[in-house]
Image (spheres, rainbow, N blue to C red):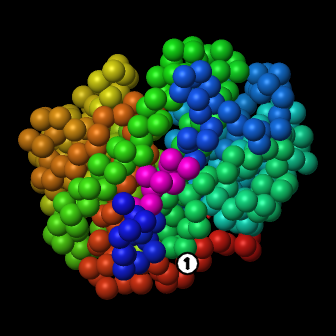
Amino acid sequence: MASTRKFPHHLIREIFEQPDALRHTIEPRVSADAGLVRLDEIHISREELRALRRINIVASGTSRHAGMTGQYMMQELAAVPVDVDYASEFEYRNPMIGRGELSIFITQSGETADTTASQREARQKGSRTIAISNVEGSTIAREADGFIYTHAGPEISIASTKAFTAQMACLFLFALYLGEIKETVSEELAKHYIRELLALPLKTETVLAAAEQVEKLAELYYRVDDFMFLGRAIHYPIAMDGALKLKEVSYIHAEGYPTGEAKHGPNALIDFRLPLVIIATCDRNDAGSVTRYEKNVSNMEGFKKQGATLIALATEGDTTIPQIADHTLFIPHAPELLSPILEIVPLQLFAYYVAAKRGLDVDRPRNLVKAVTLE
Ligand code: BG6
């Protein structure tokens, strides 16, 4: 899709390059028949990985949102406790980490100073380290015990999109790899997830094919000055990144919040003047997802009573959400742990179209740089 089209900005081209970025990141590392994940650059023994007591994920900005989804993936598939830190905060909490632990540093550029500094501290404390980066040979990768490159191709636009979805794919691959080593994932489940991973690029093309619907939505809302994005569980990091994308490129104040936390404060803000973007997808094969979905429906009904305008992300075929929300954007069905990779795409498109309609420099937002190489 992306290779032939002409795009007015790097950002929209990179959003449309995501299916290929996912293909190049996933396909070389999985064998669907054998149900195996192969990560050749992880130079840490299977025994050491099997014995891991804890995993720390450290990153900045959008990369940290990927790390937040990785926490759900690894705890669910590999039954290992995972902490997630802002790289800029990591050093201040005197991280009690050391031998028998793994620290994963996620950085598109591989050069973010907060992140490389955190990696050095983790190594000094005896932790093994893995880098997930989009730049081969970057500082973060050179100083790691192992690395998993995202093969997203150069990401020019300051706001990160294709690197982000590729990072989430890498985190899932690692969670599956670890689950196979620890035997917390059966061969049958591994084969199922690998088939679902391989189906993601095409599903992403489906979401991109509905870009025009998102552009129409942006036409309605590009003059608004405040937004709130809500997501529950593994969808909360996507709400965070949807809000960050809008902030970064359109300079609109936008907050990402856990859906269940709205009643502890933010509800006071919610009325007709504050549009809500809520992630209300559902994996009907996952009982936990269904339970959370039912809570989301109830929350949405409450927000509507408060006069809120609701923009919802729902799973294709859902007939309940469109009856409550003012606008519904549909996502193809995917397993709960993989749906975040699809859900962020309409939110990236929304941020892009709003910023473009506000006449802003979408690739080089004011005050921002692609890699913050000073702490
Ligand atoms: C910011 C970028 O400067 O750094 C963000 O504008 C990015 O897009 C963040 O998410 C972290 O960058 P990196 O390279 O460490 O992933």
Q: Is residue 59 magenta?
A: no
Quick one: quadrant of the C terminus?
A: bottom right
Residue 184 in sight from this viewpoint? yes
Residue at 35% x, 70% y is 5
Q: Quadrant of residue 316?
A: top left
Q: Which residue is mark 1?
A: 368
In the picture provided, is 304 more to the left or to the right than 144?
left
Q: Which stretch did the figure color magenta?
A: 16-24
* Ligand 1 occupies quarter: bottom right
Left or right of residue 269, residue 167 in this image: right
Question: Which quadrant of the rendered structure holds the N terminus?
Answer: bottom left
Q: Position of residue 36 (x, y in %)?
A: 62, 25
SS for callout 1: loop
In the rendered image of this protein, does residue 215 appear above or below residue 257?
below
**Measured from the top left, where is residue 216 in percent x and y?**
17, 66
The residue at label 1 has a CB less than 8 Å from ligand 1? yes
Q: Is residue 23 magenta?
A: yes
Number of other residues with Cα within 10 Å of mark 1, as a class: few under 14, some 14 to 19, many 20 or more: few
Q: Nearer the viewer, residue 325 or 37?
A: 37
What is the x, y in percent for residue 43?
A: 83, 38
